[in-house]
Image (cartoon, grey):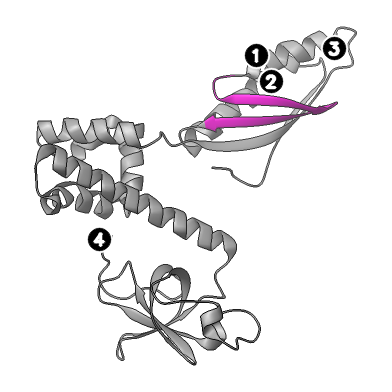
Amino acid sequence: MLYKKQGFPEVDEIVICTIKKILPHGVFVGLDEYKDKEGLIHISEISPGRVRNIRDFVKEGKKIVCKILKVSTERNHIDLSLRRVTQSQRINKNTFYKQEQKAEKILEVLSKKLEIPFEEIYKIIGSKLIERYNSLYEGYEEIVADPKAVQMLKLDKKVEKSFLELIQEKIKKREIKISATITLSSPLPNGINVIKELLEKIQINGTRIIYLGAPRYKLTLTAEDYKTAEKNLSEIESTGLKMIKDKGIFKIQRDDKRNS
């Protein structure tokens, strides 16, 4: 990637590294996201358990996800761990890195299309987005969600138009999901109709309801951001409570885990 962070990483930070040299008791790596920074992974931090041969786990040129253990700015020394990175951290970091690579490729395409040097395009677009959002890809997502946000870049109209068209074509609109369990029942003779009418009423755009077995239903709500999703969920709960009144029971229990 073209963009490189200055200075040193923070302890516990998750980073992308490229293996440069393998020694009997450790591995030297380059920190891909930092300018001119290298670190060492001791053999004890390669993998859980005893490691007899480091080359069974790593090889030169391979990209790996590591965790920062220690940083000495005076000695210009960085200690890292490979084994302490969880599966979810590895997946998230690789996803982020691939998204940033994709984002840079989009700027390369824009550069060729407009016949403007890539470095200049990066300066007027990439650097500004990273400064504001800490990520090219996240900046793109924000602009796709709200095209007016592109105005903060203060681009030439031709550049702005081409850039906007390109990211709208290449970047999917961000969506998040929240889920909840609905408890719904009615003891009335026409209780089935009461329940059916209520369920139809609360199925606003982006809402999906699945029957789990009386009296429980699974609700999944999709929106552009958590604020909108929470607002819609609150409206669903309010509508449900108003409709049920003294006709039965209506409760919404949020799932603890957020989905995205």
**Residue at the location (18% across, 32% down)?**
162
Residue type at numbered disc 4: Tyr
Residue at the spot of label 1:
201
Callout in the foreground (3, 4): 4
Q: Report whether residue 153 is seen.
A: no
Q: CA distance from mark 3 to mark 1?
A: 15 Å
| Looking at the image, residue 220 lies above or below residue 205 | below
Mark 2 residue element: helix
Residue behind mark 2: 240
Q: Are marks 2 and 1 in contact (CB under 8 Å)?
A: yes
Amino acid at dot 2: Gly
Q: Mark 3 or mark 1: name the one nearer the start of the chain.
A: 3
For residue 45, what is the image quadrant?
Answer: bottom right
Return the disc, 2 or 1, that comes first in the chain's sequence. Answer: 1
Are the residues tagged 3 and 1 within 8 Å (C-beta)? no
| Quarter in which the C terminus is drawn | top right
